[in-house]
Amino acid sequence: MKLHELRDNPGATKKRMRVGRGPGSGKGKMGGRGIKGQKSRSGVAINGYEGGQMPLYQRLPKRGFNKPNRKAFAVVNLGLIQKFVDAKKLDASAAITEDALIESGLVRRKLDGIRVLAKGEVTAKLNIEVTGASKAAVEAVEKAGGSLTVKTAPAAE
C-alpha cells in the first residue's frame, strides 16, 4: 500500500445535500422549508422545542438550593498571614484584627467577615481576632503558642 492508494471505507463519507439548487435535486425551490411561516424564514431557531414532546430541560429533576441570605466571607490562609508577618507588613506583637489584615493589603474587603483557614505553616506567636476560623486553623495557631479568637457578629435587627 502506498500513500496515494489510501481511501476511506466505502460509505464512510457522504456528500452533503445542497439545498435549493433546482427541481431535479429533490430539495429545490423552497429547500424543504415548506410554504411561508416563521420556520421558512432565515434566522429562526426555536430552541428547546421538541415538537410538543416534554423538553429535556423540563424532564430532568431540579437539584440543589442557593440560600439567598448566605454569608460570604473573605478567606485568608495561615501561611499568607505568616508570610506577611515575616515581611513586616503585619505586626506579630499586636493583635491581628480584621482591620489590620485589610490595612496590610492581605485582604481587599471584609464582606461579611474574614475567615481563617489552616493552609500553610505558622511559626510566629500570633494573636488573631476574626469572624470565622476552621478548627484546624485554631489548632495550628495554638500549637505555635498564639491564640485565635472568633468573634460573633452582632445580631442584625
Image (cartoon, helix red, strand yellow):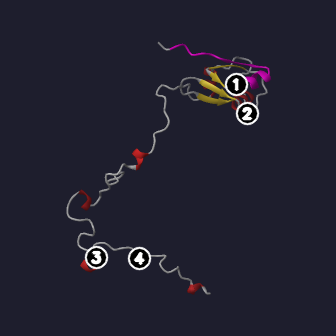
Residue beneath label 1, please? 135
Label 1 vs 2, first from the N-terminus = 2
| Foreground pick, 123 / 83 | 123
Query: Which part of the image, by quadrant, shows the N terminus?
Result: bottom right
Instruction: Identify the residue at horizontal 26%, vertical 80% (top origin).
Output: 24
* Mark 1 vs mark 3, CA separation in Å: 73 Å
- Report the number of numbered marks: 4
Q: Nearer the viewer, mark 2 or mark 4?
A: 4
Q: Percent from the top left, x then y, of residue 135?
A: 70, 25
Q: Which residues are magenta?
A: 138-155
Amino acid type for the residue under numbered disc 2:
Gly
> Contact (CB < 8 A) between labels 1 and 2?
no
Q: Give the secondary structure at mark 4.
A: loop
Structural distance between the alpha carbons of marks 2 and 4: 61 Å
Instruction: State the separation of the CA atoms marked 1 and 2.
Output: 14 Å
Q: Tell me the distance, in whole angstroms, between the alpha carbons under discs 4 and 3.
A: 15 Å
- In the picture, measured across the screen, residue 35 lies left or right of residue 147, that is left
Residue bearing mark 4: 15
